[in-house]
Image (cartoon, helix red, strand yellow):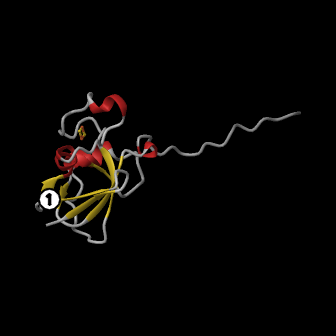
Amino acid sequence: MPLIFFEREGKTVSANAGWNLRKLAKKNGINIYQGVDKILNCRGNGLCGTCKVEIFSNEESAVSPRTAMEEKKLKKFTNPNLRLSCQVRVHGNVRVKTGPVELMRPEVEAVAPPMVSRE
Ligand code: FES
């Protein structure tokens, strides 16, 4: 039975293998959304991208692989631990970081300021 540690909340829960991470969080009173996203989300259909979490594990197969919806919604992010919790099935022990603000913004390339000539 996998153990899921929600880092920010300091709470560990257990679940049967294959449980959906979003449903598991919700069942245990853990909010994975930021602000109004708690109300304005796609209810776990992989469409809105508001249920992002970071997942860490020593076991390679602790969670299901990324779905096509995740690949589409997360393509702007370089963090390999970033997942849509509604698309994740848990099969092993994991540590989950919910809703960090830095995960809500896509990676942006640093752009050098324009060169200004003083001639
Ligand atoms: S709840 Fe909308 S993408 Fe997960």
Q: Secondary structure at mark 1?
A: loop
Asked if residue 45 lies left or right of residue 34, the reply is left
* Residue 88 x, y percent position in the rendering: 21, 53
**Quarter of the image with the N terminus in it:** bottom left
Quadrant of residue 61 within the rendered picture: bottom left
* Residue 20 x, y percent position in the rendering: 16, 51
Q: Which residue is mark 1?
A: 15
* Residue at 17% in and 64% down: 91
Q: Is residue 108 above or below residue 18?
A: above
Q: Quadrant of ligand 1?
A: top left
* Residue at 41% in and 55% down: 79
Q: Nearer the viewer, residue 66 or 43?
A: 43
Q: Is residue 119 above or below residue 76?
A: above
Please name the amino acid that badge 1 sits on: Ala
**Quarter of the image with the C terminus in it:** top right
* Residue at 54% in and 45% down: 109
* Residue 105 x, y percent position in the rendering: 44, 40
Q: Is residue 5 above or below residue 39?
A: below
